[in-house]
Image (cartoon, helix red, strand yellow):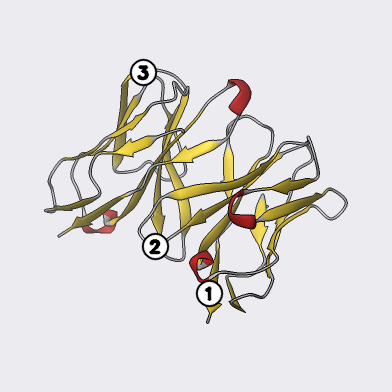
């Protein structure tokens, strides 16, 4: 079974409108959850991390994500998209906090002028 | 800031050549990883290491080997490169302590085998 599922392979928004990138995970334990961003020809950069301290996690560049245990979701949001946000985003889970990471298949975000 | 450095960003090698991809991290992390990334296939784990001289196979180890002689350095070796190993290779590290299990990535190495 998939440990992490990104529900959209592509998302397109207009500049200045909200962004929602969806991620669902499967874990019977209390996992660590992450969002990473990858710009073309670059490595993955950490946006934010959830480790059970608070369900709403704020990250860099105005992104935030909310951990909802009842829905096993960890969706990434941003109130207002910028052109520079166009990139691929990965949801990642460490199911048992053993440094064993499972990656979603990625969501490509397109931002239209 | 954590820094994971991959020494070669772009390489072109011939079929059958031995290829070394080098990775160095500066955060004294215990764990280091090699992934390959291909369109439509996402990130796939090749090998990881949780200590010096220790290694574990990931999901796609065939055709690859690794070396970790020092804690900060993790090398990926293609013994005899083949065209199906043309890909983007990503090195990463993670540690213990306050930063816990956050994984940090290098900028990637684009390998083309001709």
Note whether residue A2 is visible: no
Instruction: Give me the C-alpha separation between circle 2 and circle 1.
Output: 12 Å
Query: Mark number for residue A40?
Result: 2
- Could you say which quadrant of the image residue B12 lies in? bottom left
Q: Are marks 2 and 3 on the same chain?
A: no
Q: Chain of mark 1?
A: A
Which residue is more in the foreground, B89 or A81? A81
Q: Is residue A90 left or right of residue B89?
A: right
Apparent side of residue B112 relative to residue A76 in the rendered image (left or right): left
Task: Give whichever of A89, B37 is nearer the camera.
Answer: A89
Instruction: Find residue B15 and report its horizontal and vertical position in percent.
Output: 14, 53
Q: Is residue A96 above or below residue B105?
A: above
Q: Earlier in the sequence, mark 2 or mark 1?
A: 2
Residue depth check, mark 2 versus mark 3: number of the one nearer the observer: 2
Q: Which of the 4 quarters of the picture holds residue B112?
A: bottom left
A27 in relation to A22, above or below: above
Say what secondary structure mark 1 lies in: strand
């Amino acid at each position: 079974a998939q440990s992490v599922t990104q529900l959209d392979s592509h998302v397109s928004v207009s500049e200045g409108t909200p962004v929602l990138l969806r991620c669902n995970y499967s874990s019977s334990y209390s996992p660590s959850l992450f969002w990473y961003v990858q710009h073309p020809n670059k490595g993955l950069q950490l946006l934010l991390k959830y480790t059970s301290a608070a369900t709403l996690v704020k990250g860099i560049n105005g992104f935030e994500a909310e951990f909802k245990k009842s829905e096993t979701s960890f969706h990434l949001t941003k109130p207002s998209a910028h052109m520079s946000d166009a990139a691929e985003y990965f949801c990642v889970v460490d199911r048992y906090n053993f440094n064993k990471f499972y990656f979603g298949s990625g969501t490509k975000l397109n931002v239209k002028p | 800031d954590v820094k994971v450095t991959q020494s070669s960003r772009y390489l072109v090698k011939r079929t059958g050549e031995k290829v070394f991809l080098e990775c160095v991290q500066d955060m004294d992390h215990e764990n280091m990883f090699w992934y390959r990334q291909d369109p439509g296939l996402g990130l796939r784990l090749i090998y990881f290491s949780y200590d010096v001289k220790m290694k574990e196979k990931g999901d796609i180890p065939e055709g690859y080997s690794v070396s970790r002689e020092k804690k900060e350095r993790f090398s990926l070796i293609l013994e005899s490169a083949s065209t199906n190993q043309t890909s983007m290779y990503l090195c990463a590290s993670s540690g213990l302590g306050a930063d816990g299990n956050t994984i940090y990535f290098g900028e990637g190495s684009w390998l083309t085998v001709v």
